[in-house]
Image: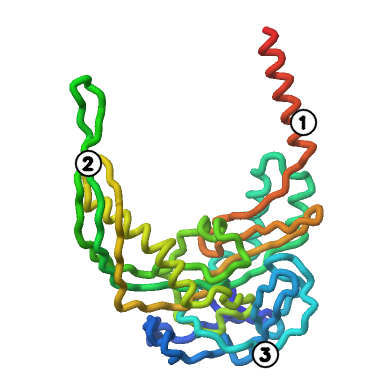
């Protein structure tokens, strides 16, 4: 299995280690988006022996090596009652960011995170420790593109009128912005809340390695849930457009800016399917499912937490008592 502590394969029986692949000759390839549109992409399996299983509760499909099957879904904690089958082909991952944090380190981060939560139930830490964390590679898309944007806006200059009151004088501005986009990142999973995924940023993408199945040994990998065309549309609206608007505001200048129109054309669009590592835990507390996810490179922790009704009620009561005594005095 892959050992994050030494970044090598380690035999679980004798402890010997081995390097993965030959990085000296490996190359991370960007694929033209038109190649996908023309249905000219080769679909492959993550590994020749990979199996996959679909969760009957949340619908997530995860892939694993035969010896690494799990009894519960890492995303919703539901029992995995469906029989695994041979993994279906998919757009091949171009690269992978290997696990850099071991399970015991992730567990420690989670326990520290829980310990800092105010008004959390007393048994939450024990519950999270009992449920444990699962190492999963989450699917992402990255996009490169050249953009040309014709824009129209207004530049605001602040001045003071005869009564010395601040006013803004607006004037029309227009122009063209050329911007090259590199590795615009879009999650391809819907099994983890998007606000948590964004909060896990930034990822050290410069440390990615060309994909090899050996990196999956001992871990699971989720199949992408957001298809490539949809991901590209989302990236344009959620990632690239804000970047363009920010640069347009810089071009407009002045004290304030208004962006009225953005008409963007794209060229030389390329993409990669990549896998990013997380430690994820899902636990059920009073019939509701909560998730905790750890960036397995940086150690950033994000997640959901239950609240203790008793602790919240006591805090409110104490606050009311303090307010009452201050009011009386």
Q: Which residue is mark 3?
A: 86
Q: Quadrant of residue 220?
A: bottom right
Mark 1 residue element: helix
Which label is found at residue 314?
Answer: 1
Which label is found at residue 34?
Answer: none
Left or right relative to 175: residue 229: right
Question: Mark 1 and mark 3: span between their CA atoms?
Answer: 54 Å
* Label 3 crowd bin: few (<14), some (14–19), many (20+), radius 10 Å: some
* Label 2 crowd bin: few (<14), some (14–19), many (20+), radius 10 Å: some
Q: Residue 160's spot in the image, x, y percent?
A: 21, 27
Compared to residue 13, the image places residue 101 above or below, namely: above
Mark 2 residue element: strand
Q: Quadrant of residue 12?
A: bottom right
Residue 19 visible in the displayed image: yes
| In-front residue for pair 325/170 | 170
Mark 3 residue element: strand
Judged by depth in the image, the label closer to the viewer, 2 or 3, is 2
Left or right relative to 314: residue 26: left
Q: Quadrant of residue 55?
A: bottom right
Among numbered discs 1 and 3, the one appearing first in the sequence: 3
Q: Residue 121's spot in the image, x, y percent?
A: 76, 44
Q: Which residue is mark 2?
A: 170
Residue 10 visible in the displayed image: no
Q: How many marks?
A: 3
Question: Mark 2 and mark 3: span between their CA atoms?
Answer: 63 Å
């Amino acid at each position: 299995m892959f050992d994050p502590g030494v970044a090598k394969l380690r035999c679980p029986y004798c402890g010997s280690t081995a390097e993965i692949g030959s990085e000296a000759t490996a190359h991370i390839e960007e694929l033209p988006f038109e190649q996908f549109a023309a249905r000219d992409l080769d679909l492959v399996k993550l590994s020749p022996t990979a199996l996959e299983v679909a969760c009957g509760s949340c619908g997530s499909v995860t892939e694993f090596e035969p010896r690494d099957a799990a009894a519960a879904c890492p995303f919703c904690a539901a029992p995995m009652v469906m029989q695994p089958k041979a993994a279906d082909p998919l757009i091949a991952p171009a690269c992978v960011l290997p696990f850099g944090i071991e399970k015991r380190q992730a567990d420690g981060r989670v326990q520290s995170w829980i310990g800092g939560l105010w008004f959390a139930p007393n048994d939450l830490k024990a519950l999270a420790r009992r449920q444990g964390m699962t190492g999963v590679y989450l699917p992402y898309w990255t996009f490169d593109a050249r953009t040309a944007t014709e824009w129209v806006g207004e530049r605001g200059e602040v001045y003071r009128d005869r009564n010395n009151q601040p006013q803004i004088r607006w004037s029309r501005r227009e122009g063209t912005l050329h911007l090259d986009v590199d590795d615009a990142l879009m999650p391809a999973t819907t099994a983890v809340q998007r606000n948590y995924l964004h909060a896990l940023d930034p990822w050290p993408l410069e440390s990615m390695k060309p994909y090899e199945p050996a990196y999956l040994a001992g871990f699971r990998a989720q199949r992408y849930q957001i298809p490539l065309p949809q991901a590209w549309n989302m990236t344009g609206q959620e990632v690239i457009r804000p970047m363009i608007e920010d640069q347009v505001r810089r071009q407009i200048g002045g004290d304030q800016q208004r962006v009225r129109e953005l008409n963007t054309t794209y060229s030389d669009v390329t993409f990669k399917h990549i896998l990013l590592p997380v430690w994820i835990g899902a636990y059920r507390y009073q019939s509701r499912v909560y998730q905790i996810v750890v960036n397995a490179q940086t150690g950033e922790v994000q997640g959901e937490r239950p609240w203790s009704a008793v602790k919240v009620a006591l805090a409110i009561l104490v606050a009311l008592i303090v307010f009452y005594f201050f009011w009386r005095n």
